[in-house]
Image (cartoon, helix red, strand yellow):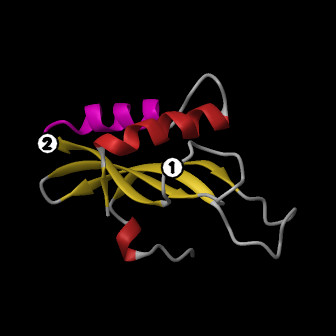
Amino acid sequence: MDFIAESKKNHIWRKTVWHTDPDEHPLTPAHSAEVYCCEEVNGYAVWYVRKLGKNDGHGLDGVDNGDYLLRFFAKDRRDEALEWAVLSANHDGGVDDTIKALDLLVPAGQKV
């Protein structure tokens, strides 16, 4: 049985947009970009977790790594929260365009 961290039990949807391949780079730090939607006490939160290498070419310059609360939805807007999370984490242009689009949402979000 897999262990699920207590902090992740309230996640209702999650997508890893990009991550380093441990088989190709076993000795380097793990980098990733992910989006998740989770249930909070009074609604639903959409988070962007950005852990990218400083000069790896992903994302926009000037955006720091961190956990960003992109949007918060009321308790009765679960479907809208999920839809917004899914649409935010997917882009027609591929991984780099998706990360850049997420980085553009950062100024309107809140870094935690």
The residue most toward the right is 24
Mark 1 vs mark 2: give the one in front. 1
Tell me which residue sits at (57%, 76%) in the image: 1
Tell me which residue sits at (40%, 66%) in the image: 8
Q: Where is residue 9 in the image (x, y as percent from the top left)?
A: 37, 66
The residue most toward the top is 92
Q: Residues in magenta?
A: 76-88
- In the image, what residue type sits under mark 1? Gly
Which mark identifies residue 74? 2
- In the image, what residue type sits under mark 2? Ala
Q: Is residue 96 left or right of residue 112?
A: right
Q: Position of residue 62 (x, y in %)?
A: 51, 49
**Circle 1 sits on which residue?**
62
Q: What element carries label 2?
A: strand
Q: How many marks?
A: 2
Q: Do the residues labelled 1 and 2 touch (CB within 8 Å)?
A: no
Q: What element carries label 1?
A: loop
